[in-house]
Every structure is written in structure tokens, then in C-alpha cells.
Image (cartoon, rainbow, N blue to C red):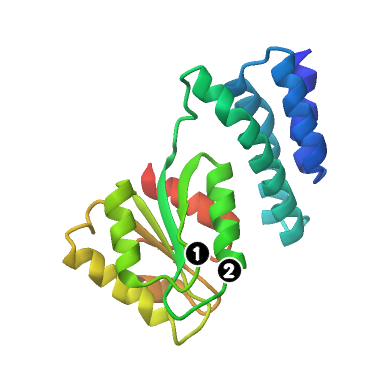
């Protein structure tokens, strides 16, 4: 029974059917399947396939967003069950993410946040137009080991540099790996400002995040 259920769960994400994903998650819980198994054997398997298809160009951004939405809705059902069993999905790391000050681009940054949380990271999304000190305060408060800075304008890219400098001044640079992204951002820019990595899209951000915290 459970094997078939895991396959159906994974398939609901691959097919981009969040409603089916939620319904199957409820059915799996009702059938007494462990929440952790639902995540590992069903949901994560599906998300990985979606990620691969997106990486190879077979799927596009909307496919990714729909799958991530299904995953998030399923996790909303599973979280209370995990808490009741005093279980925690082993967190891959804690990420503070946001779009830098002066920049109000939301979609790319939100997608990275969603994909990271679907892949087991604890994500604190500060939104857009985030002042430098807010990034610093949140890293302090959460003990985050990753910081994601998004900038979609050439004029706001310099803010990424300022945040890296502010981290150094606050004595937090050793604690946190910094990822930068956004349309005008390049690998050489990341190196120039002393960031730890650059990701060009949501899937490569997840791969980079895993690499940086491992």
C-alpha cells in the first residue's frame, strides 16, 4: 500500500497537481504512514524529479512554482503531525533571504526561498527592499548559516557588497555563507564582493546552498 502511495504522491508534484498532493498527504496520514516517510519517500522524490526536468529545460518556471506550492501545502499538513511526534525534518540549514534595499523584485527571490524550504532548509524571507541592518539583525537572531541576497538592478547590486561588508563589521562573516543572485549578477561579481557563491536560478541556488553548508 505505502509504496503505491509514495509513487502517487511524487507523481502529483510531477504532474503539477497541488490539490491531489494535499489529498494524498491526508490519505497517507489517515492510513497511518509516518509523516517523515511521506516526506522522504514521496514528496522529496517528486520535487527532485521536477527539479531535474526544470534543469534540463523540459519544465519551465510555472511548473516549478506549482510543484513547490503543492509541497508547501503538504508540509503545512505534516508539520503539526511531526511536532506531535516530537520529530523534526532534519534541517539542511537556516537561510535568511531577501531582495536588497532599493530593489522591489519579488518573484526570483521568493522562488529560491520556496525551493530551499522544499529541500529541507529553514527559510526566513525578509521580502523586498530590505535595509542592510535588517539582514544583519536577522542573521544574529536566527543563527543562520546562509544568507541569500537578490538584486535585479545594476544600481542595487552594490547593496550586496555593502551587506557583505556589514557582516564583517558585525563579526558574523565567519558564521554565514553568502549567496548572491539576480539578473545582472555574475560569478565574477560574487567573487569581487567576497560572497561565497552565485546562483543563476532557483535550482542552482538549492544545489549551491547544499554545497555551501555541507
The location of residue 64, given as percent across then percent down, is 70, 53
> Is residue 39 depicted above or below 101 in this figure?
above
Position of the C terminus, as image quadrant, is top left
The location of residue 46, given as percent across then percent down, is 71, 37
Location of residue 75 (image quadrant): top right
Q: What residue would you read off at disc 2?
A: 106
Between residue 139 and residue 80, name the one nearer to us. Answer: 80
The location of residue 135, given as percent across then percent down, is 34, 63
| 23 relative to 156 in the view: left or right | right
| 34 relative to 193 in the view: left or right | right
The location of residue 177, given as percent across then percent down, is 33, 55
| Label 2: element kind | loop
Label 2 packing within 10 angstroms: few (<14), some (14-19), many (20+):
some
Which residue is at a point 46% across and 64% down the rendered structure image? 98
> Is residue 157 depicted above or below 97 in this figure?
below
Location of residue 148 (image quadrant): bottom left
In the rendered image, is residue 14 in sight? yes
Given contact means CB atoms under 8 Å apart, are the residues at marks 2 and 1 in contact?
yes
Which residue is at a point 75% across and 34% down the rendered structure image? 22
Which residue is at a point 45% across and 59% down the rendered structure image? 97
Q: What residue would you read off at disc 1?
A: 127
Q: Earlier in the sequence, mark 2 or mark 1?
A: 2
Position of the N terminus, as image quadrant, is top right
Which residue is at a point 55% across and 66% down the rendered structure image? 200
| Label 1: element kind | loop
Location of residue 117 (image quadrant): top right
**Residue 161 shows which numbered tag?**
none
In the rendered image, is residue 60 in sight? no
Q: CA distance from mark 2 to mark 1?
A: 7 Å
Amino acid at each position: 500500500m505505502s509504496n503505491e502511495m509514495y509513487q502517487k504522491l511524487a507523481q502529483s508534484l510531477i504532474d503539477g497537481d497541488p490539490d491531489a498532493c494535499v489529498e494524498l498527504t491526508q490519505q497517507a496520514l489517515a492510513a497511518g504512514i509516518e509523516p517523515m516517510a511521506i516526506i522522504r519517500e514521496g514528496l522529496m522524490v517528486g520535487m527532485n524529479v521536477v527539479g531535474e526536468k526544470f534543469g534540463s529545460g523540459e519544465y519551465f518556471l510555472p511548473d516549478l512554482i506549482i510543484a513547490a506550492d503543492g509541497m508547501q501545502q503538504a508540509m503545512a499538513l505534516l508539520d503539526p503531525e511531526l511536532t506531535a511526534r516530537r520529530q523534526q525534518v532534519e534541517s539542511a540549514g537556516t537561510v535568511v533571504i531577501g531582495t536588497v534595499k532599493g530593489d522591489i523584485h519579488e518573484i526570483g527571490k521568493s522562488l529560491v526561498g520556496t525551493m530551499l524550504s522544499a529541500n529541507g532548509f529553514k527559510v526566513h524571507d525578509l521580502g523586498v527592499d530590505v535595509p542592510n541592518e535588517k539582514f544583519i539583525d536577522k542573521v544574529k537572531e536566527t543563527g543562520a548559516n546562509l544568507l541569500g541576497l537578490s538584486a535585479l538592478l545594476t544600481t542595487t547590486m552594490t547593496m550586496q557588497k555593502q551587506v557583505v561588508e556589514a557582516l564583517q563589521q558585525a563579526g558574523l562573516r565567519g558564521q554565514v555563507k553568502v549567496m548572491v543572485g539576480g539578473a545582472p549578477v555574475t560569478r565574477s561579481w560574487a567573487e569581487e564582493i567576497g560572497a561565497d557563491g552565485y546562483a543563476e536560478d532557483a535550482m542552482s541556488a538549492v544545489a549551491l546552498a547544499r554545497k555551501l553548508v555541507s
